[in-house]
């Protein structure tokens, strides 16, 4: 391809606290390549691409790029629009009309699946457009990657929320005995497992963790909770939003269960289980869905996560210019702790697949994560834990004091 061409980028799927760092990396790297005359953003993902609603990103300067890197949500606007076969076939022509030589999709495993289909349609149409997948997801479920940009920041929030809920519930255990926290992650439990790093002793939260990868037994759950409450007087439980029973049925009320899988929204397990605990154990239980804040809370995000997201964006542009279309940028963890390398892997190998937690990371009997999992995750988090008093006062530690009247 000769002459100046355009790079087109779209943000897709659920945002993260660092997805805009990836966009900033793309914008900044594109400027260093004379063959790229402009970076064009699709407004609201596929909606912008199909409706020809675009914006030039050439006007970003150093200050605005810095602010972009520190902004949660998707700056361009995102989309979960499930594309039809006819829409897939339209995309090569739409990109060609934009004079695009490079097309980058930022997203998770569903986005990578679609990117592969778009790449194949472009080949069929005989267009010379390099399609590159740029990974992001708080779920950490993209296969063949050590970890995904967005995950570590969400993990930090989950850990902090679990730690704080544990301290709060411990102080209120004469009123409320059980708190069940529901965590994002869809069909995998990486974020739910991350909560385990909040626990510094067996007495502290979380006391029980349930992952979607392990079939959920409601009777066993009730016995587990009862045992913890009997021992400590309270229990903090973390459940992945996608937990299922042995038959594959979702736990709890999921009003979105029957819609298109790519747009499926999970939820309801914590409320269902809190009600079950209250009814069967005759104690107070509260459900706490950590909600969307998990993926967008910027004050506590991981510095390493932000830097990786930025460099993934830059690596994606380099892959595109090197004509590595049909691939996704991949983070590979090297044997030396903390060292990383950016590779490319075929979109066909990652699209639509989910990376589950290894069995060695979770103790099914204890309902908790292993030391191996903690050792893997800790370097991605950085130093950030707040300092708390570890022990609450006991009656024997309190001493009456004489109070003398004034005057």
Image (cartoon, rainbow, N blue to C red):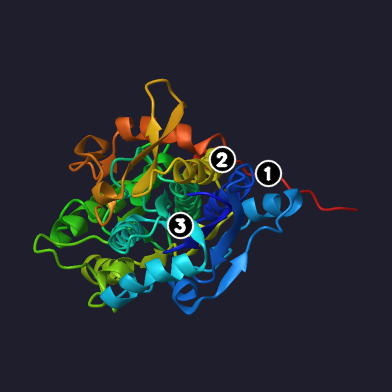
Q: Which residue is mark 3?
A: 103
Q: Residue at x 24, y 47 (%)?
A: 349
Q: Is residue 40 visible?
A: yes
Q: Could you classify mark 3 by the number of other residues whose Cα lies within 10 Å: few (under 14), some (14-19), or many (20 or more)?
A: many
Q: Which residue is mark 1?
A: 401
**For residue 79, above or below residue 9:** below
Name the foreground residue: 279 vs 33.
Answer: 33
Name the foreground residue: 173 vs 144.
Answer: 144
Q: Name which of mark 1 and mark 2 comes first in the sequence.
A: 2
Query: Label 1, label 2: how many angstroms apart (C-alpha)?
Result: 55 Å
Q: Position of residue 162 (x, y in %)?
A: 44, 51
Name the foreground residue: 234 vs 318.
Answer: 318
As drawn, the label of residue 307 is 2
Q: Name which of mark 1 and mark 3 comes first in the sequence.
A: 3
Q: Is residue 254 visible?
A: no
Q: Name which of mark 3 and mark 2 comes first in the sequence.
A: 3
Q: In the figure, residue 282 lies in which quadrant?
A: bottom left
- Assign a secondary structure to mark 3: strand
* Left or right of 192 in this view: 69: right
């Amino acid at each position: 391809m000769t002459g100046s061409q355009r790079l087109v980028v779209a943000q897709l799927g659920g945002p993260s606290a660092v997805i805009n760092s990836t966009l900033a990396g793309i914008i900044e790297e594109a400027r260093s390549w004379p063959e790229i005359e402009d970076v064009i953003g699709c407004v609201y993902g596929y909606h912008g691409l199909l409706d020809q609603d675009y914006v030039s990103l050439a006007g970003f300067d150093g200050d605005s790029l810095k602010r972009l890197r520190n902004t949660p949500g998707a700056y361009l606007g995102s989309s979960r629009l499930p594309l039809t076969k006819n829409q897939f076939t339209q995309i090569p022509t739409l990109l060609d009309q934009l004079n695009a030589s490079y097309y980058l999709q930022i997203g998770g495993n569903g986005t990578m699946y679609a990117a592969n289909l778009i790449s194949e349609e472009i080949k069929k149409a005989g267009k010379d457009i390099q399609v590159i997948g740029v990974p992001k997801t708080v779920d950490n479920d993209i296969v063949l990657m050590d970890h995904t940009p967005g995950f570590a920041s969400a993990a930090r929030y989950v850990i902090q929320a679990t730690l704080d809920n544990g301290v709060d519930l411990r102080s209120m255990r004469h009123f409320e005995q059980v708190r069940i926290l529901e965590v994002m992650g869809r069909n995998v439990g990486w974020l739910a497992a991350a909560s385990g790093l909040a626990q510094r002793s067996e007495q502290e939260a979380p006391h029980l963790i349930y992952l979607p990868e392990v079939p959920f037994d409601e009777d066993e759950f009730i016995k587990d909770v009862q045992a913890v409450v009997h021992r400590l007087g309270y229990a903090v439980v973390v459940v992945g939003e996608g937990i299922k029973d042995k038959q594959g049925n979702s736990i709890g009320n999921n009003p979105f269960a029957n819609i298109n899988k790519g747009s499926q929204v999970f939820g309801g397990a914590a409320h269902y289980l809190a009600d079950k605990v209250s009814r069967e154990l005759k104690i107070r239980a509260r459900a706490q869905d950590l909600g969307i804040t998990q993926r967008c809370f910027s004050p506590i995000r991981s510095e390493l996560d932000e830097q990786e997201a930025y460099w993934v964006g830059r690596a994606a542009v380099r892959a595109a210019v090197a004509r590595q279309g049909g691939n996704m940028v991949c983070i590979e963890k090297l044997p030396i702790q903390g060292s990383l390398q950016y590779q490319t892997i075929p979109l066909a190998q990652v699209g639509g697949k989910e990376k589950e937690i290894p069995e060695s990371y979770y103790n099914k009997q204890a309902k908790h994560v292993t030391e191996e999992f903690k050792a893997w995750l800790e370097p991605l988090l950085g130093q950030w834990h707040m300092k708390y008093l570890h022990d609450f006062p006991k009656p024997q530690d309190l001493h009456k004091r004489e109070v003398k009247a004034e005057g």
